[in-house]
Amino acid sequence: MRKLNSIRLKNNKVTENLETVELPIPKKVKIPMIMSIGDACIPSVKVGDEVFVGQKIADSNAFLSLPIHSSVSGKVVAISYYNLANGKTCKAVEIETDGKQTLSPNISKPLITSKDSFLHALRESGSCGLGGAGFPTYIKLDPKTTIKTLIINGAECEPYITSDYRQMMESPDDIINGIKYVMQCLNIPKAIIAIEGNKPKAIEVLKKRAENSSEIEVVALPSRYPQGAEKVIIYTTTGKIIEEGQLPSEQGIVVINISTIAFIYQYIQNGIPLVTKRITVDGDAIQNPCNVFAPIGTPVSDILSFAKAETDEIKKLLLGGPMMGMSLYSLDTPIVKTSNAVLAFKTYEKRLESPCIRCGRCVSVCPLNLMPVEIEKSYIHNKVDELKKLKVSLCMNCGCCSYTCPANRKLAESHQLAKALIQKG
Amino acid sequence: METYVIPILIFSGIGLIAGILLHVASKTFEVKVDEKIEQINEALPQINCGACGYAGCADYANAVAENDVPANLCKPGGNETARKISQILGKDVVEIVPELAVVHCNGDCNATTKKFIFDGIQSCVAAKRFYNGDGVCTYGCLGLGDCVAVCEYGAISIKDSIAYINKSACVSCGKCVKACPNQLISLRPVSKHIDVACSSRDNGKITKLNCKNGCIGCKICEKKCLSDAIKVVDYCAEIDYEKCTVCGACYEACPTGAITNCSIKI
């Protein structure tokens, strides 16, 4: 097996030993109608309605869509618009909280008797890939082929983020039980828990829990970025290559984030849908770095003030990790299902772009062996056929090329634009 | 003697055979080129802009000569080219209504503000993908010049962070219309010089907050219009140029300056 190209990043996992704390209930939450991939949901509540924790407030019939639940109890005050980082605009339900966090009376333990009822319950839970991509879990676990291997992704290869690590340390039983439950429901013979080698404690904890079950294997991955990317983790754990346009399930593999699997088990136990997220708050503008449980829809400003951030000093604010996270321009941006970190920095260095010197460093770090320099050139000249030949659609936007480029060229961004260009035709 | 005669004979022989072969080949494989097509092609401006709807000038020349395609589709060439083509084909001359590209945004840096500093690839398409653009108005001109880059005539420039079109340089080829990710540019007859310089579909309150020059959908123009040519759709006025008589009543009545009159302001 070949070693995939990757880069080594400074871990900066300052918050790894800090236990997750509950965030004080925010005064107001704003829940966007697009949180995972797929079409926007249609709000089923009106302005003035009373809502409770876990109450379904939006749903859609479109493929890939997931229901959305209220994360707080209170009153709907507005249905406004929200600009997503990818340029889309969707509706958002704004709820003023009453601070009581009353559970919705409709919440009950889901009744699971078969695979179908399990998948239905998964849809109702609003569960999607919590690592960042946000692919609905009920579709992921219902492939046309039989699943032979379940990979649990606990790589968490991005610097700063420790939310998955805290998940492993704080509730490892949920993870193991969740894996066993999913394996039993879907008849999966084997599961691999893949964790980066820089988290020895987590590996030890999970190995201990999985001791008695021979079908669950805990694997230590090399601590390189991007180890947690789906294609990379499949290759390093099983040696299988996912071709262009192929889904992992076509090779009999399903990759699930470690927090998602723990959530599935919690949902089966108590029936509370996905309404809170574990968020890492870090960065040099934060005086009190921490891990918090935040209700979905919490404005970033609430989290920052809880972590005692020097709000005026912030020059760069990220939702997500430094490699794949998105810059925020407004402190009112809400936390969504796929968020896992809020990073605030005091410094922002404008990277001046200069011409490509054809050193080929981007080619030597691309985990998928693409040629970023050629892709960028073809994009500039609008050569769609050339871009297809260079297989830009494989790019997973990990950002290794942009990170390593000595000329500071915006390679990863141009790949995203190139993908959009191909789709446009 | 022989040393001279034999080579000369050999070469003359080869020349003769090759000549005959070439002659036969040119007769059997002859491609009949319509002289008209060549003439039309010469009359066209040869910039291959595609405004006529064909792949380029040669393609259009073919189409005009062989099919019943109107002779006045070449906008950059204008009336002169249309006349030449009609003469070549012996058709009646159909005049082109001269058109002009106009930008439906008046939100320059004095009128509106930015949400954040966009530090990605400096193109409108890239900016549009990131939070719908860096301006507070998500419908307005992004000012990064995708239209400038496609214009072959240098007719577009960015002034005060929005696109301006030089009336005298624009040949109405329509390339910029396709390049704008916010669909802000459209073509209209040169003589109808009243434009709605706003495309905001936000309601009046939000538009007013975002931009001083935005159309707030107050419908005053609709009431003032004598020929029923202006209509407010989704909080934004739209002019039907078939009906517009360029009286200027809407321009004078507009409280925000969202309607511009090109004969006065360039």
Image (spheres, coloured by chain):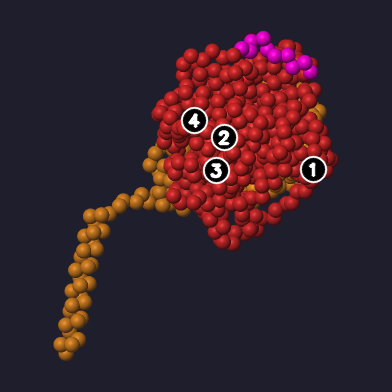
Chain colours: A red, B orange
Query: Residue A285 — which label?
Result: 1
Sequence-earlier tag: 3 or 1: 3
At a point 55% along the width and 29% down the height, the residue shown is A176
Q: Which residue is mark 4?
A: A213
- Classify 10 Å Cα crowding around label 2: few (below 14), some (14-19), many (20 and above): few
Sequence-earlier tag: 4 or 3: 4
Sequence-earlier tag: 1 or 4: 4
- The answer to whether dots 2 and 4 both sit on one chain is yes
Q: Main secondary structure of the magenta part?
A: loop
Classify mark 3: helix, strand or loop.
strand
Query: Residue A248 — which label?
Result: none
The location of residue B193, given as percent across then percent down, is 69, 36
Sequence-earlier tag: 1 or 2: 2
Q: Distance of mark 4 from mark 3, alpha carbons?
A: 18 Å
The location of residue A24, given as percent across then percent down, is 78, 25
Q: Which residue is mark 2?
A: A208
Q: Distance of mark 2 from mark 4, alpha carbons?
A: 10 Å
Q: Which residue is mark 3?
A: A220
Q: Quadrant of residue B209?
A: top right
